[in-house]
Image (spheres, grey):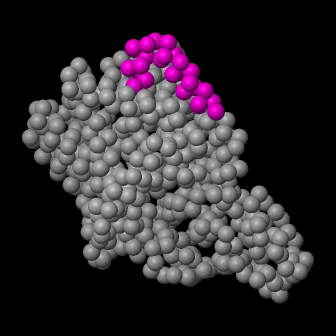
Amino acid sequence: MWSSLIGGYNYCRNNPWLVVLFLSGAAIRILYIGSIPGGLNQDEASIGYDAFAILHYGIDRNGIHLPIHLISWGSGQNALYAYLSMPFILVFGLTPFSVRAVSLLMGLLGMIVFYLFSKALFKSKSAGLAAMFLIAINPWHIMMSRWALESNVLPTLILIAAYCALKSFQSPKWSYGFTVIAALSLYAYGTAYFFIPVFALAVAAFLLYNRMLTLRTAVWNVVLFVLLALPILLFIIINHWKLQSIVTLLFSIPKLTTPRVEEISSLFGGHLWAAAGANFRNFISLIVSGTDGLPWNAISPYGYAYPIALPFAVVGLILMLQSLWNKERASGPPFLILLWLIVSVLMSLITDVNINRINVIFYPLLFLIVEGFLGLARKVKAAGVASTALFSIFFVLFATAYFRDYPQRIGPAFYESFGEAVQYASIESKGKIYVTDQVNMPYIHVLFYEKVNPHDFIKTVKYMNPGHAFQKVSSFGRYVFGRPDITSKEKAAYIIWNGELQSLPAESEHFSITKFTNYTVLIPEG
């Protein structure tokens, strides 16, 4: 252990700029992660509460024992993020930070693996340094690392899998790492159901064709992949053909109200070619504009990689194709990046596009940006310096916007202070609590902040629309959801949106009023 510490110290001392870049990237991903974005997105609260419930009670909020896929609202939520969150919830309790910790960890790990991959891809220490610079300041990667969405783990898992595939060019044993991570990715997000099989088959074919993998090793990898992927395959079969759930001692494979992956993918609907054309146009628009219009995915005008990045990616694509054609570098690494890119583009044809649904494309795009950046720097050194300065200026502007202006914009979208209002009302009142309908799925926030026993929730919950894709809760326990008439006769507490304050009835005079950032609590007096 002591020798490892000395080795690590010597490595840091010999690579000071690399350490500075990594620590700078880590700092912007860690700073205020529990409070920016303020509040919680409903999907964050959902995956966090289900992780808490499974960790402490063995069931999710729908009563499913150790599910391989969460039922969530009814139409499903991938479960891998929830299971990865459990150690953080166990140590830190159920908080915004503990739920976001997995995204943060994946972001930090992604920076390291991207650097290692780039060093191997470009055969240069300086290239690795450029890669660390560009990943550390990348706005998509920063924003993805700071909030908890199940899809946020998928890109870095694929990056790790691709790195294992890259290492398997020299040592076939790394192919097992590729297989394990690729199979695990199937539990991360629904788009992996298309991406992983296509990408894995293409990688395996390339390795076999170039005799980097023996037939025996390939067969064992197939067996391993099938065994690890079998539960999610059964999940897809059960929900597509509306079969019965499977329950075992080790895990459960649930039946959803409506499989959401079929709602966002044109593979399961009619008019496939028309949908593919529309999806591709949206994809091109996103790539060119840099944003999908969702405030949690991108901040205008910085987009997923700053406005100056796309020309570098185009140049990088040309240079990488040239190197592959001329075999100036070993053909494997560039082929792997281009294959990753091609499969990502194909996936966009069958996906209702936004940034988080096609997030698997951004690592290969970043590799192309690094390639273009290095190509320009090799041709004209002054242009490389100017590009570095320009990227740095954009990064400073983005960081300023993110920490100064963004919190006011994202706070209402993430229901900032709603949790405070719920906790205050729960402590200060004893009767019913009526909760505003100006929150998307308000019941999940109550479950999250009050850490409700899932058994109690299941016993008392009443749904407005049972069986729908997004089941809305009308009440559970002492919480009632909707917009009720405020009356002092019932001696109930009320949580309302601050925009509703102007329309308070005269009855509100009989309540003590406590105002939070976006929500207000009315507690009956006396």
Does 100 lie within the magenta span? no
**Position of residue 322 in the picture relative to residue 423 (left or right):** left
Q: Position of residue 204 (x, y in %)?
A: 18, 41
Q: Is residue 12 visible?
A: no
Q: Position of residue 214 (x, y in %)?
A: 10, 36
Is 266 in front, or is 203? 266
Residue at (81%, 75%) from the top-left corner? 503
**Position of residue 414 in the picture relative to residue 377 (left or right):** right
- Above or below, 10 against 502 in this view is above
Residue at (66%, 73%) from the top-left corner? 437
**Position of residue 457 in the picture relative to residue 504 (left or right):** left
Residue at (64%, 33%) from the top-left corner? 397
- Above or below, 349 against 434 in this view is above
Q: Position of residue 8 (x, y in %)?
A: 46, 20
Q: Position of residue 135 (x, y in %)?
A: 48, 32
**Position of residue 14 in the picture relative to residue 259 (left or right):** right
Name the quarter where the C terminus is drawn: bottom right
Residue at (31%, 28%) from the top-left corner? 318
Name the quarter where the N terminus is drawn: top left
The span picked out in magenta is 372-397
Does 379 lie within the magenta span? yes
Q: Which residue in the rendered view is the most extreme toward the left?
A: 215
Picture quadrant of residue 469: bottom left
Is 446 in front, or is 382? 382
Q: Main secondary structure of the magenta part?
A: helix
Q: Is residue 271 visible?
A: yes
Is 162 in front, or is 5? 162
How many labels were placed on the picture? Answer: 0
